[in-house]
Amino acid sequence: MRSVSEEQFRTWGHGLRQADANSFAELFDATYDPLHRYAMYITRDSVSASDILQDVYLKLWQVRDTIDPDRSLRALMYQMVRNYALNHERQKKRHAAEAIEADHHSVGFDNLNDEKLDAAILEQKMKEWIEAMPIRRREAFMLSRFEGLSHEEIAALMDLAPKTVNNHIVLALQHIRSKLEAYRNRESD
């Protein structure tokens, strides 16, 4: 999707506003694989990523008349995938926590289960820390770390200067490091 120009996205945006099925099909073909990788990075599950994309494309078609072709359709789609994937992960964690709690009452934990639980808790904490970041910082960080876009590509996507993107990512990493350090200190007490 990196090779697709913003002009092409504007053309697809205009086509979507006019309910042009061919524009939607072209957009789908050009964006499915990279968006699937992005959803996979968040969910670590191909089936879930496919389900999320199905929901995203359906929602995109449903709101097609509200799309502003002059705004970044690419950024909108990444944002939609991110939001759907994070909501999916929150629901999955909630169900897992409920299942673990039910199992905890009926069966004792061994060390392996404790380690899995610790990893799951830390992963959830990381997602919470990322979610707590300001929206633009979180978006720049996720596009960099989860989608592998360069600072220049993110700058073009978010309509920011590359230096601003760099600042967002540096601040995001500092935020996560400080939260992780505080979490580790609390755990060792």
Image: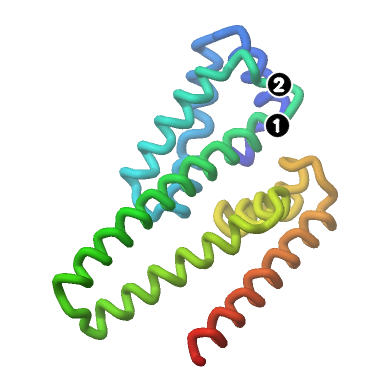
Quadrant position of the N terminus in the picture? top right
Tell me the residue at 42%/31% (across/down): 55
Residue 170, horizontal then vertical, whole percent? 74, 67
Tally the marks: 2
Task: Confirm or deny contact between disc 1 and disc 2 (CB under 8 A).
Answer: no
- Between disc 1 and disc 2, the foreground one is 2
Query: What residue do we see at 19% from left, 67% from top?
Result: 103
Residue at the spot x=71%, y=21% of the render?
68
Q: Residue at x 72, y 62 (%)?
A: 169
For disc 2, the neighbor class at 10 Å (few under 14, some 14 to 19, many from 20) is: some
**Which residue is label 1 attached to?**
72
Q: In the current view of this chain or complex, which residue is farthest to the bottom? A: 189
- Around disc 1, counting alpha carbons within 10 Å, would you say few (fewer than 14), some (14 to 19), or many (20 or more)? some
**Pointer 2 residue:** 68
Q: Position of residue 46 (x, y in %)?
A: 34, 47
Looking at the image, residue 134 lies above or below residue 31: below
Q: Nearer the viewer, residue 132 or 14?
A: 132
Q: Secondary structure at mark 2?
A: loop
Q: Seen from this angle, which residue lies furthest front?
A: 105
Position of residue 144 measured from the top left corner of the image (x, y, whole percent) = 64, 56
Q: Is residue 128 above or below residue 61?
A: below
Percent of width and height locating residue 126: 53, 66
Gap in Å between the C-alphas at discs 1 and 2? 8 Å
Give, as a three-letter code, the residue at label 1: Ser
In this picture, residue 114 sits left or right of residue 137: left
Residue type indicated by callout 2: Asp
Q: Is residue 28 left or right of residue 141?
A: left
Secondary structure at badge 1 equals loop
- Is the image coloured rainbow, by chain, by secondary structure, or in one colour? rainbow
User: Relative to residue 185, is residue 102 drawn left or right?
Assistant: left
